[in-house]
Image (cartoon, helix red, strand yellow):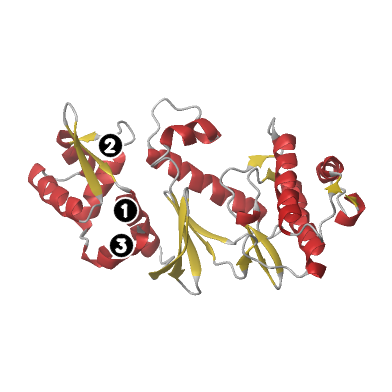
Amino acid sequence: MVDNIAGFFRELEPADFYLLSGVEQGMRFSEWVQREELPKYAELTTEEVDYRLDRCMRHELIERKTIQYEGYQLTFEGYDALALRTFAERDTIEGVGAPLGVGKESDVYEVQSFRPMALKYHREGYTNFREVQREREYTADRDHVSWLYTARQAAEREFETLEGLYPDVSVPRPVDQNRHAIVMEKLTGAELSHAELESAQVVGVLELIIDEMAAAYDAGYVHADMSEYNVFVDTDGVTIFDWPQAVDTDHDNARELLERDLENIYSYFRRKYPGETPESADLDAVADDIVRGEFDEMQAYLSS
């Protein structure tokens, strides 16, 4: 994806981006943009559109489909190129480095700036569009929703949440956002799923995670997708990431989602560290105290 784009990014000309922006504009109204509409959207002549289509097709920035008409849409590589260009014009990033993580709904890369940063591209909606459209509330009130809109809304939602949480909650520092992409602080340490905690650290790390969940609730948010895959652990503590599905604390299901987050994290510690994690905990009481702003020490909720 991004590493492919970075290789020929400097070869792209301004008119190539006009064409890509034109396809992006047309996809607001139709999944596949008619070729005849592209001169209007891209503000290019018909001849220039033909030339730019060939160039962008060659670089796999767009794809073509013949239905009742010849239509075009952006690939994620094309959408990546548009966002990268914006970040470069803003001097947010200077170069793209190695992948940091590739998942079902996002790809993350190291980028160069005044310090190493992370570039996260949301991929929601491209391969499992209908499923995402059902699950994510930010697409629920639109009749025509393209995967571009779904991915962009996820990025906007996550960036807005990070700005609301940082620095009071240990989350990646948000730097910039454009389209479906976020630039943020690069995390250090290890993902919780890969970390091997010493026996004496287990309950303490569990408590640190729940402390951050409580701080997030105080700031007005429930993560709503907590697991061992979105917590980083290092010598300075823990950092919680991946917030696009977060809900406000006044959401109808906020309490239920908070309880689910607590259960997910506690169950993980029980599975991986059964000897160090007590068999049961009063997670309902933990949730009650988080909601009241009274959560203190995890030890008080544990039973041996």
Is residue 297 in view?
no
Q: CA distance from mark 2 to mark 1?
A: 17 Å
> Which residue is the site of mark 3?
4
Classify residue 293 as left or right of residue 270.
right
**Cα distance between the residues tagged 3 and 1:** 8 Å
Q: Earlier in the sequence, mark 3 or mark 1?
A: 3
**Quadrant the N terminus occupies:** bottom left
Secondary element under disc 3, as helix, strand or loop, is helix
Nearer-N-terminus badge (2/1): 2
Residue type (three-letter) at the residue carrying disc 2: Gly
| Residue 270 screen position, x and y as percent | 76, 53
Question: Which labelled disc corresponds to residue 128?
Answer: none
Instruction: Identify residue for label 1.
Output: 77
Q: Residues within 10 Å of mark 1 (few under 14, many from 20)?
A: some
Compared with residue 72, is residue 241 higher up or lower down, i.e. above or below? below
**Contact, mark 3 vs mark 1 (Cβ under 8 Å):** yes
Judged left or right of residue 298, residue 267 is left
2 or 3: tag closer to the N-terminus: 3
Residue 78's x, y, as percent?
29, 51
Along the horizontal axis of the image, is 115 left or right of 28?
Answer: right
Q: Position of residue 14 (x, y in %)?
A: 22, 58
Relative vertical location of residue 271 with respect to residue 124 in this rendering, above or below: below
Task: Tell me which residue sits at (50%, 68%) in the image.
Answer: 117
Q: Which residue is mark 2?
A: 26
Please count the marks in the image.
3
Specify the amino acid type for callout 1.
Glu
Badge 2: few (under 14), some or many (20 or more) residues near its Cα, within 10 Å?
many
**Residue 87 relative to residue 272: left or right:** left
Q: Residue furthest front?
A: 275
Q: Which is more toward the observer, 273 or 88?
A: 273
Q: Are marks 2 and 1 in contact (CB under 8 Å)?
A: no
